Image (tube, coloured by chain):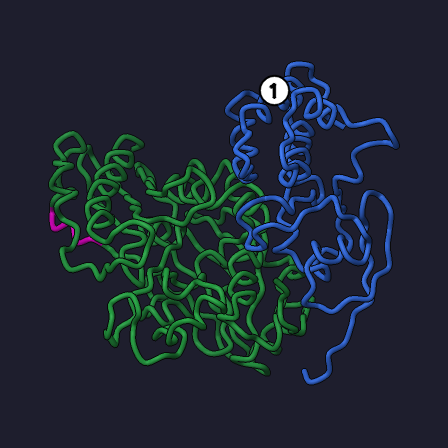
Chain colours: A blue, B green
């Protein structure tokens, strides 16, 4: 265990495969932001508490600050960059814009991805299901009302899924 | 903050994993979901030179009903437990506990084995390196005395796992394996040392592979937890209750407290519940029965005096819920 060696790993991010040489102690968050320049995934508490670093792993929201890049090979990773197609925003992103659900914006990618994962399993979730789903995403601007309204509007329209 | 360098092993088979654990001993840590482990490494509280990733060991995953028991692989995630109809039906107290852990995205990664083997916590220990640099190291960090109870030679860090108390109430056992030795099964409570500095550990080179929860008919179980936020937080007080009924009378009753010291605390109920009809149980007496000498000091975000009171309240609530579920 004396030598510090990099590993050559393959990550599938937003349906694109990437070959990356990385040290085993680097998190998925670090590799996404630094190696793949996907800065949409945010680093905030770095302790697994806040949810700013949320990405989807095989469709489920997870904390990318608590995942090692080497352990997610072969899994399907979705970041906020994978949601819009070009200039056209995903309906959840559009709803956040329409409802002014963005203040400083740091929690937004995580909120949007968590909402997407919820809609992927249930097109019209209840209010309680929405609140439970985003309970792990902290907005320190405390703009929860507009965030919940935005997510609810997508739920009402039934257009949040894939 | 960056994680310091460590090597990462990904054994593909159980014998390979046990060989690594034996070869490197204390230098490596088993890595399950990583949700509790990585923050400790980041804070510099653990400095393993390698992690042994258990993620590739398919045999350690899954919930299987065999005979009158649920066999749960140690690497089964909390989300899988939460979604299991068998766990909800036959181990309701465990199901409650699982749903009370952290938040859904963490439960997707966290495992039952990792949850049981989490370290104890203290406001004077779980802090950044910069915070700790301003003070002498506490007992748990290798110093000479406890900072929470100044001058004390005893560590008062609190075991705040939600699952272990529920599993102990259900009478669960854990299977431990090591290289070159016979696998052994021990009751979950025997994993706990009672020492805040090293609250829970298997023997050298040992790894938990399976948790076995007995299924008993006509039972009720529950878990109730105090926390300041309805998400994310570790328990500040909690209780799990289990009752088994035979012929309209309570035959077995167990009450186990969480966040009540360096280990889950089994409360001696001394005939307060067993031998009675469910409707005749004096819940206030159950609340009063929790030990008076719990080693609680002011090392959590609410005072010890409040936590002591709340343990009695949550013990009552847990027993009430368990009785209602029979």
Rendered-image quadrant of the N terminus of chain B = bottom right
Task: Give the left or right position of residue B290, taking residue B169 as reference.
Answer: left
Q: Position of residue B72 (x, y in %)?
A: 50, 52
Q: Residue at x 37, y 76 (%)?
A: B136
Task: Give the left or right position of residue A43, taking residue B75 as reference.
Answer: right
Q: In the rendered structure, the residue with mark 1 lies on which chain?
A: A
Q: Position of residue A142 (x, y in %)?
A: 52, 33
Q: Quadrant of residue B322?
A: top left
Residue at the spot of label 1: A152
Residue B105 seen in render: yes
Residue B180 seen in render: no
Of B77 and B61, the residue lying toward us? B77
Q: Position of residue B132 (x, y in %)?
A: 43, 70
Q: Is residue B314 above or below residue A125?
A: below
**SS state under label 1:** helix
Instruction: Assess disc 1: are there few (<14), some (14-19) or many (≥20) residues with their C-alpha within 10 Å of its C-alpha.
Output: many
The span picked out in magenta is B267-271
Q: Residue at x 33, y 49 (%)?
A: B236
Q: Residue at x 12, y 44 (%)?
A: B272
Q: Quadrant of residue A111?
A: top right
Task: Give the left or right position of residue B3, taking residue B243 as reference.
Answer: right
Q: Is residue B308 magenta?
A: no
């Amino acid at each position: 265990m004396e030598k510090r060696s990099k590993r050559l790993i393959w990550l599938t991010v937003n349906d694109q495969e990437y070959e990356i040489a990385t040290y085993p102690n680097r998190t998925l968050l670090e590799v996404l932001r630094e190696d793949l320049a996907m800065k949409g995934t945010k680093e905030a508490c770095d302790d697994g508490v806040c949810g700013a670093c949320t990405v989807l792993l095989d469709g489920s929201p997870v904390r990318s600050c608590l995942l090692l890049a080497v352990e997610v090979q072969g899994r399907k990773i979705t970041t906020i960059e994978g949601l819009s197609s070009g200039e056209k925003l995903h309906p959840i992103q559009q709803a956040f814009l329409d409802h002014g659900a963005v203040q400083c914006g740091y929690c937004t990618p995580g909120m949007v991805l968590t909402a997407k994962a919820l809609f992927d399993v249930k097109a019209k979730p209840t209010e309680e299901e929405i609140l439970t789903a985003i309970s792990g995403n902290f907005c320190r601007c405390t703009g929860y009302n507009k965030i919940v309204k935005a997510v609810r509007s997508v739920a009402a329209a039934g257009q949040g899924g894939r | 903050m960056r994680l310091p360098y460590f090597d990462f092993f990904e054994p593909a088979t159980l014998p390979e994993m046990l060989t690594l654990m034996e070869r490197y001993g204390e230098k490596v840590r088993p890595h399950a979901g990583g949700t509790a482990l990585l923050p400790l490494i980041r804070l510099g509280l653990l400095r393993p030179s390698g992690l042994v990733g258990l993620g590739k060991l398919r045999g350690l995953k899954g919930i299987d009903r065999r005979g009158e028991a649920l066999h749960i692989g140690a690497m089964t995630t909390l989300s899988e437990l939460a979604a299991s109809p068998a766990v909800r039906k036959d181990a309701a107290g465990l199901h409650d506990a699982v749903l009370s852990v952290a938040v859904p995205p963490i439960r997707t990664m966290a495992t039952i084995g990792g949850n049981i083997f989490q370290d104890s916590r203290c406001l004077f220990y779980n802090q950044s390196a910069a915070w700790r640099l301003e003070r002498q190291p506490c007992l748990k960090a290798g110093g000479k005395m406890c900072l929470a109870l100044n001058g004390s030679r005893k560590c008062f860090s609190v075991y705040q796992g939600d699952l272990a108390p529920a599993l102990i109430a259900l009478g669960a056992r854990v299977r431990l394996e090591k290289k070159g030795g016979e696998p052994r099964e021990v009751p979950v409570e025997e994993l706990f040392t009672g020492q805040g500095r090293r609250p829970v550990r298997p023997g050298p080179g040992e790894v938990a592979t399976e948790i076995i929860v007995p299924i008993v008919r006509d039972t009720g179980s529950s878990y109730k937890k105090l926390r300041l936020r309805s998400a994310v937080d570790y328990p500040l007080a909690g209780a799990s209750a289990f009752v088994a009924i035979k012929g309209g009378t309570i035959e077995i009753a167990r009450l186990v407290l969480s966040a009540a010291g360096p280990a889950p605390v089994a409360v001696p109920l001394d005939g307060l519940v067993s031998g009675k009809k469910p409707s005749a149980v004096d819940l206030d007496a159950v609340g009063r029965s929790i030990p008076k000498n719990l080693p609680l000091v002011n090392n959590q975000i609410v005072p010890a005096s409040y936590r002591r009171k709340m343990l009695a309240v949550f013990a009552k609530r847990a027993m009430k819920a368990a009785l209602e579920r029979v």
